[in-house]
Every structure is written in structure tokens, then in C-alpha cells.
Amino acid sequence: MSSQAHVIKTRLPEPPPPVEVLLASVRAAVEEIKAKDVVEIDVRGKTSVADHLVIASGTSTRHVKSIADEVIKFAKKLGAMPLGVEGEREAEWVLVDLGDVIVHVMLPRVREFYALERLWTVGDQPEPRDD
């Protein structure tokens, strides 16, 4: 006797929520759980992976995981299932992939070390002028 395998499908709803709605949901989630130093970066034209990155800090590994869980909960209310969640076990840096929006929740020391804001905004600032 063989048993049938269970297939778990993770996908965005048909149609996926608009990016603005997804971003608003992420904002509400990180605000609800009191994430620190929240930054949104528009990466359209820099990568085809996503349109926006949201980077936030938590005060402890428990706080980092709670913020990521809240983002997932708010996304599910829209009918959007995360395409992937990484780093929950260690919870020093948790990545939640919502398709057009990728959320990074990090401990401050990890965030400082990887400096994602600098990485993704290089060239966005005007060149200093010598007057």
C-alpha cells in the first residue's frame, strides 16, 4: 500500500495584491510590533527580483522573529502567501519574500555589518559639488 504525498503550494493570490497595498500592509505590521529604524528602498530598475525592500531592526532575536511573523500574518490577511522565509531559526536576520516586496528584519549589529541600505542606494545620491 502506498500513501499519496501531500503537496504544499505556495503562491500569490490571483491576482496578487498591488505593490502599494502590500507595502501598506508591511508598514502596518512593522508598526504594530514596534520595529526600529524602518527603511523602504525602491529597487525598481536595479534588480528584477523585487520592486521594494523594507529593512527593519528588532531589539532581540525574539523581537526579530515576532516582527517577521507579524509581516507574514498581515500578508496572509491580503491573501498573499510568502514565497519564502529564511533565517527564522537563528532570528538574527529574517528575510520574508512577498514577491514584489522583500522584508529584511535584522538585529542592529547584523544590519550595520551588512549595510544593505548602502548597498542598494549607491549612486542614488547626487555627487558632491566643489564650489
Image (cartoon, rainbow, N blue to C red):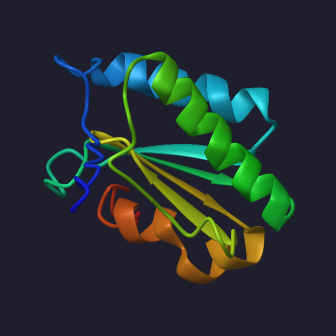
Q: Position of residue 123 (x, y in %)?
A: 29, 64
Quarter where residue 92 is shown: bottom right
Q: Quadrant of the C terminus?
A: bottom left
Circle count = 0
Residue displayed at 17% across by 57% down = 47
Question: In the drawing, does residue 13 fall left or right of residue 114?
Answer: left
Q: Is residue 129 visible?
A: no
Q: Which residue appears farthest toward the front when viewing the image?
A: 1
Residue displayed at 63% across by 23% down = 28
Residue displayed at 18% across by 57% down = 46
Residue displayed at 65% across by 71% down = 89
Asked whether 84 or 128 is in front, the reply is 84
Question: In the drawing, does residue 13 fall left or right of residue 66?
Answer: left
Q: Which residue appears farthest toward the bottom when viewing the image?
A: 113
90 above or below 43? below
68 above or below 1? above
Question: In the drawing, does residue 14 fall left or right of residue 20?
Answer: left
Q: Position of residue 84 (x, y in %)?
A: 38, 55
Asked whether 82 or 45 is in front, the reply is 82
Quarter where residue 59 is shown: bottom right
Q: Quadrant of the N terminus?
A: bottom left
Q: Position of residue 62 (x, y in %)?
A: 83, 59
Q: Position of residue 90 (x, y in %)?
A: 68, 76
Question: In the drawing, does residue 50 fall left or right of residue 67?
Answer: left
Q: Is residue 75 visible?
A: yes
